[in-house]
Image (tube, helix red, strand yellow):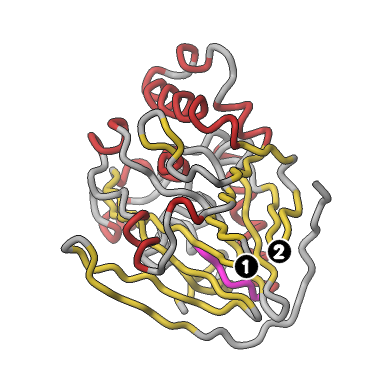
Amino acid sequence: MANSPMSRRRFLTTSLAGTALAFASRAIAATRINVGEKQIYALSDGHFDMPASMFLGTPESVKAQIGDPARIAANTYAYRVGDRTILFDAGAGTSDFITKSFPTVGELPDELGSVGVFAEDVTDIVITHMHPDHVGGLAIGDRMAFPNAQIHIAAAEWNFWNASGFATGAPEPMRPMVKNVQSLSNVIESNVSLHSGSADLGDGVSVLPAPGNTPGHTAIVLDGGREQFIVVGDLTVHEDVHFANPNFGWAMDVDGEQAVATRISMLDMIATDGLIMGAAHVTKPGLGRVERKGSGFRFLPL
């Protein structure tokens, strides 16, 4: 696939509309947003409650602000164009690995249904990285959850998680997660399309390397003509931590130093270029812009 460098553009206004309806005794609130000439949906997969101690280097005053456990949102995004329906990440799914520890996620199928998207409609799924909360929704047991979808993943990411011996050689606390990801990989492998980390996926969708959280972590960019939208995966994990304090760590980062450097450079780019940001782990719908504030940044919800 051809490389697709991100250009700097002048951005105009964004229109935001919410749609809400009842579904399976739960209130669904998918948010629709226009990105220039294109339209996306922001979808909630639920939330996680995580120990505040996972925010490495974070002082007690910040931990008190975010709570312990800290509530972390789980958002995904969908884009329809022509005969393609494209998901940006796939949610956590319902494997035992997820549901035993995090029963508050797995809502993505309901949210998709609320905007008229069903599993067989999805043609492409672009993955930021392979942590289970971003890829678990790709499979239901031993079958594909989205049977007609081509799944786009960075080769560095796929190879990292599926390395021979990793499930037994990884640090002990990490091994259940690695086994979960490798089991998932066996189910989806025939539908996976690997890219270099910087690729044009067509119809205005491209990916950019954003390593650190994982080796093949990528950001996803949608070019709407007058505006651009960027999905950042685990670049930021909480709106009250990683914007004002981008140098604070996260326990799930594979390379903490690189993760911090990537976070700072990418947030600077998002602020400079005026991009609309889709943040997986900012309170739903996770849509906003970024501005510089002091030595850090500030997230401005739309």
Tell me the SS state at disc 2: loop
Q: Is residue 191 above or below residue 246?
A: above
Q: How many marks?
A: 2
Seen as rendered, the residue at the extreme left is 25
Residue 244: % across, % down: 48, 64
Q: Mark on residue 283?
A: none
Residue at 43 percent of width and 83 percent of height: 17
Q: Position of residue 50 (x, y in %)?
A: 29, 45
Q: Nearer the viewer, residue 185 or 244?
A: 185
Marks 1 and 2: in contact by CB < 8 Å? yes
Q: Is residue 170 left or right of residue 224?
A: left
Image quadrant in which you'd find residue 61? bottom left
Task: Point out the stretch of residues depicted in magenta.
Answer: 274-279
Badge 2: few (under 14), some or many (20 or more) residues near its Cα, within 10 Å? Answer: few
> Circle 1 sits on which residue?
81
**Residue lying farthest right?**
2
**Mark 2, residue position:** 203
- Is there any visible trace of residue 247 in the rendered image? no
Is residue 275 found inside the magenta-colored segment of the image?
A: yes
Dot 2 or dot 1, earlier in sequence: 1
Residue type of the residue flagged with mark 1: Val
> Label 2, label 1: how many angstroms apart (C-alpha)?
7 Å
Helix, strand or loop at disc 1?
strand
Q: Residue 178: horizontal and vertical position, in percent?
A: 45, 25
- Image x and y of residue 145, in percent: 43, 42
Q: Which residue occupies the foreground of this view, 287 or 2?
A: 2
Q: Residue at image x 53%, y 56%?
A: 87
- Residue 231 part of the magenta segment: no
Amino acid type at image mark 2: Asp
In front: 46, or 233?
46
Q: Can residue 201 be seen in the rendering of this structure?
A: yes
